Amino acid sequence: MNDRERFLAVARFETPDYVPIFGFGGAPGMSGGALKHTHDRLIATGMPKQIGGCVDNWKMRDLESWHRYWGTTGQIDLDFKMAWGAEGFRTTTRREGEFEVIESESGEITRQVIDNANTYSMPQFVRYPVRDRASWELYKTRMTPRQFMSKEDLEMNCRRFDNRNKPLRIHAGSTYGTVRDLFGVEAASVMLYDDPELIQDILAFYQAHFENHVAPLIERLKPEAVDMWEDIGYNVGLLISPKHFRQFCAPFYRSVAEVAASAGVAVRVVDSDGCAMELVPLLAECGFNALYPFESKGKNDLMKLRQNHPKFIFFGNLEKEVVNEGNEHLIEPEIMSKVPPLLKQGGYFPNGDHGLQPMVTFKNLCKFMTLLHKVCGNPEGEFPRISFRAGGWGDNGDSRFPHGSRAQAIRERRLVAGSGTAQAGPALAKR
């Protein structure tokens, strides 16, 4: 199987040759590299310097070497758009001590730490780009595309993605997430009541963009995944009521789901942080069938969700902090309490629940990956596997490792054939 076939097998609740350690960009878990300071930390604690996957000032470097080394995988995205050339807004930046203040022509003011793209601390949003209808009209005018791809160029670009061996993702947009980014949580919440017509206008603008400039791509390319982004949850529930989701968000979702389903898209997925227990049934109502990253601290109970949504696809849910320094004792219980039972039911892509943090250590990530690959029957990766005593992790006779023997057999066949692609590095002794 190639990556595309393996992705589809899991998404369709079929049996792949092994379960991939897959992560969507945006919340890739352990699959998609790390921000620069975190990547530096991994190298400082033992990861070879030549391993890429470093995100420096929002630019990814050599993700493929990260995939090879850690035995992970991800999606491919389009490198072109049907519409572009919006005027946008000019910004100015000034420094205030350890902070920088960014001011936009839209009226937006943001205060953040220096090198925020790599530190990725939460900025202070002093003023948001949209405050009322007048500021929205300006924003809409400045963000309307003015250049469009011809049918001939569209077809030429699409052909490059026809014979793919990795899953293709096409991003469809956002509803509440966009409104929240424009107004801020507090003002957006008030606007749902005080000016619902303005909220409808904003969402209609973005839905029209989808229907005119994204839907044709889905219809032509028939991707393996179509996703939307929201971040609509906090630690115990939704930031808006189910009533408001159905009123404001659901029409856009249904439009996307209808286009995707007609194109045979297997995974119609949403990226949302926080608690998704209320969100999953709402998405299912709209024709979506997947979500990531199911953050562990968001009190997401995937076994409970599986009872009510037997064909909903889960991504992530493994607590990212278990690979941080001092937390190595949490790795085994986190993986073994969740992954085997969810894999048994199918439709689950196990991974960290968002992304790696600067407190990670190389050895802890090796421990995590050793066990996760074992449980998934996954032979990929060049990272040093952990050696375990008899009866410890990785015992092929343990019923908790239903795919373990399969992974070993795949690795042995590859080594006999001389490919060497799955050969592990030297083992690290377990302390």
Image: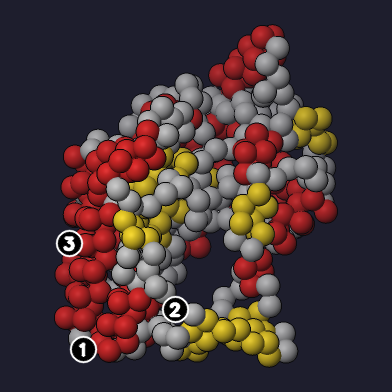
Q: Which residue is mark 2?
A: 89
Question: Looking at the image, which residue is at 58% across and 47% down?
Answer: 32
Badge 2, how many Cα within 10 Å: few under 14, some, many 20+? some
- One can see residue 417 in this view: yes
Q: Position of residue 91 (x, y in %)?
A: 52, 81
Q: Are marks 1 and 2 in contact (CB under 8 Å)?
A: no
Q: Which residue is mark 3?
A: 251
Residue 395, compared with residue 53, is above or below; it is above
- One can see residue 268 in this view: no
Q: Position of residue 14 (x, y in %)?
A: 36, 26
* Quarter of the figure with residue 346: top left
* Quarter of the figure with residue 253: bottom left
Q: Position of residue 116 (x, y in %)?
A: 64, 72
Residue 121, compared with residue 64, is above or below; it is below
Q: Is residue 227 left or right of residue 67?
A: left
Between the residue at mark 3 and the residue at mark 2, the CA separation in whole angstroms equals 29 Å
Disc 1 secondary structure class: helix
Type of amino acid at the residue the image marks with label 2: Phe
Any mark on residue 72, and which?
none
Question: Looking at the image, which residue is at 51% across and 45% down?
Answer: 23
Q: Are marks 3 and 2 in contact (CB under 8 Å)?
A: no
Badge 1, how many Cα within 10 Å: few under 14, some, many 20+? few
Q: Nearer the viewer, residue 311 or 244?
A: 244
Q: Is residue 182 left or right of residue 402?
A: left
Disc 2 secondary structure class: loop
Q: Which residue is mark 1?
A: 194
- Of the residues under marks 3 and 1, which one precedes in the sequence? 1
- Of the residues under marks 3 and 2, which one precedes in the sequence? 2
Question: Looking at the image, which residue is at 27% across and 44% down?
Answer: 151
Type of amino acid at the residue the image marks with label 3: Pro
Type of amino acid at the residue the image marks with label 1: Asp
Placement of the C terminus among the 4 image quadrants: top right
